[in-house]
Amino acid sequence: MKTNKLCIIRLSKYKNALYRLKSLGFVRVFSDNLADAVEATASQVRKDFSIFGISGNKRGGYKIDELIEKLNIILGKDELQKVIIVGLGKLGTALSRYTGFEKEEIKIVAAFDIDSTKFNQTDIKMIKLNEKTPVLALEYLPEFVRKNNIKIGIITVPDIAAQQVVDIMLSSGIKGILNFAPIRLRGNDDCIINNVNLEGELENLIYFVNASTKTKGK
Amino acid sequence: MKTNKLCIIRLSKYKNALYRLKSLGFVRVFSDNLADAVEATASQVRKDFSIFGISGNKRGGYKIDELIEKLNIILGKDELQKVIIVGLGKLGTALSRYTGFEKEEIKIVAAFDIDSTKFNQTDIKMIKLNEKTPVLALEYLPEFVRKNNIKIGIITVPDIAAQQVVDIMLSSGIKGILNFAPIRLRGNDDCIINNVNLEGELENLIYFVNASTKTKGK
DNA sequence: TAGTTTTTGTGATTTTTTTCACTACAAATA
DNA sequence: TATTTGTAGTGAAAAAAATCACAAAAACTA
Ligand SMILES: NC(=O)c1ccc[n+]([C@@H]2O[C@H](COP(=O)([O-])OP(=O)(O)OC[C@H]3O[C@@H](n4cnc5c(N)ncnc54)[C@H](O)[C@@H]3O)[C@@H](O)[C@H]2O)c1
Ligand SMILES: NC(=O)c1ccc[n+]([C@@H]2O[C@H](COP(=O)([O-])OP(=O)(O)OC[C@H]3O[C@@H](n4cnc5c(N)ncnc54)[C@H](O)[C@@H]3O)[C@@H](O)[C@H]2O)c1
């Protein structure tokens, strides 16, 4: 199965668009509706589906409910995904309070920091996963991750601290890391590290805006 | 000049890595050092530079100071980039308080919202750009953007409000938008819209982690 | 029922991006 | 000065991704 990062990203966009279409009362979609909703082409939509063996009906398009269900299974949304976050500063706080993840079956179940003024829990044994997100000392991370079988971690610590956090995560059994620190992190083959580089995104935008305003047209 | 988004993103990574190397006392770099620092290959580094006519010395590598300077010019960092943000909620607040942008010559000069409890300024005429980020009512956006010649805007409003904000930005003369709302926005040819899809990034990571744990190996 | 329309599914093709492989040259060394 | 060494620069090749184009099936039409 040929998978490519962009393709998976599109799958989650399709899924989001489908929820929106569904809430608008639609029952069916065609590849070109989806293409339009996510800024792709109709044939790309169909090719993406074909890669994952998703099929619709000729002339009838795709049934939204079925399509959502299939996409959710592919994207691992058939079960709640437990995630931890390290670094409860400005960005970490924003992420941990974001309610939008929950409807995607993603839950930030614990936060870790080294700043003791941020802790709201000290006894790891008392924590229940459905209460308000506990904020714990970093040293509890390995135990927490193992006990709760956590696979995904988010890093929102300053860049100088990020590699240290990666090392702790790796040795605790984390298998996927979403890193917001603007630095290259070294992992191992057993763990996927994806980076979100917000400075980079802004710089990129600035570059293309400057490039296009300098050359007058697009 | 063949430009591609990934290539520009790499340029900003090179630049970041160069600052780090410089602060470590290095004066020169070779393409393979840079490759290592940003997770690329040496030939990609050289090719990227060749696209932009950046050249080094055979056997001598690149002089870090010169390289930084050239990259900064390409990336538009020779002058302060003024940016506005709309939606001062959880994420918008984190971004507007982030100090890391300033060292990249990017400054969030004003924030806009519709929630009056967030405003800290009411008279647009009184605002000076070097004071604490003013938070204004959305209705002042067009005037502010025109007077201060702002080209870049960040959107951190809920998805249902995002298109409306785009429309206001476009008609005010904004040329580049960085959007955090998980929805496709419609712009025009005169304005570049880049999306940061944090849910998507997490879902993507979850997919690949699940895919690799299911198939045992990498 | 036959014909027409619409939309899927996918192999073939094109385009884009990355990697390879080799030349040229500057610096170090003998 | 001659020789060796290491690295830049770059066209060619390969790989990856996107697009095209069209046959086939389903759903309408009359
Ligand atoms: N805030 C933003 O909007 C923004 C934008 C772009 C990038 N980033 C990046 O995201 C990261 C976080 O940014 P921020 O603005 O939230 O920073 P912040 O300073 O507000 O928060 C960092 C948090 O990490 C904690 N911390 C530091 N070292 C730690 C360690 N070793 N283990 C655990 N916790 C530790 C600190 O106590 C603090 O709570 C940084 O790498 C930054 O470059 C942030
Ligand atoms: N918080 C996160 O970590 C996070 C993560 C992923 C995506 N996002 C996305 O980022 C956006 C913001 O998220 P948030 O958590 O900061 O939301 P939030 O609810 O905390 O903040 C939204 C802000 O936008 C303002 N607003 C609403 N309508 C507006 C309008 N028409 N004009 C101007 N301001 C308006 C609100 O008053 C509020 O201050 C959302 O689209 C969300 O999906 C956020």
Image (cartoon, coloured by chain):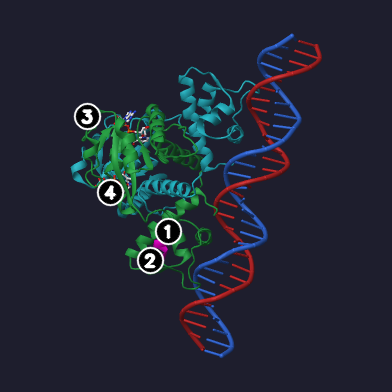
Chain colours: A cyan, B green, C red, D blue
Mark 3 highlights which residue? B117
Which residue does the numbered mark 2 point to in the structure image?
B65
Label 1 – label 4 distance at C-alpha: 21 Å
Q: What's the CA distance linking mark 1 and mark 2?
A: 10 Å
Q: Nearer the viewer, mark 4 or mark 3?
A: 3
> How far, Cα to Cα, is label 2 from label 4?
24 Å
Q: Is residue B70 magenta?
A: yes
Check chain identity for marks 1 and 2: say if they share one: yes
Q: Residues within 10 Å of mark 1 (few under 14, many from 20)?
A: many
Instruction: Name the element at disc 1.
Output: helix
Give the distance between the C-alpha atoms of the residues marked 4 and 3, in whole angstroms.
Answer: 24 Å
**Rendering quarter of residue B74:** bottom left
Q: Earlier in the sequence, mark 2 or mark 4?
A: 2
Helix, strand or loop under label 4: loop
Q: Label 4: how many residues lie within 10 Å, few (<14), some (14-19) or many (20+)?
A: few
Callout 3 secondary element: helix
Query: Badge 1 is on which residue?
Result: B71
Report the magenta residues as a range.
Answer: B64-72
Residue drawn 44% across the image and 64% down it: B33
Q: Residue at x 33, y 68 (%)?
A: B25
- The reply to whether residue B88 is in sight is no
Q: Measure the C-alpha gap from mark 2 to mark 3.
A: 46 Å
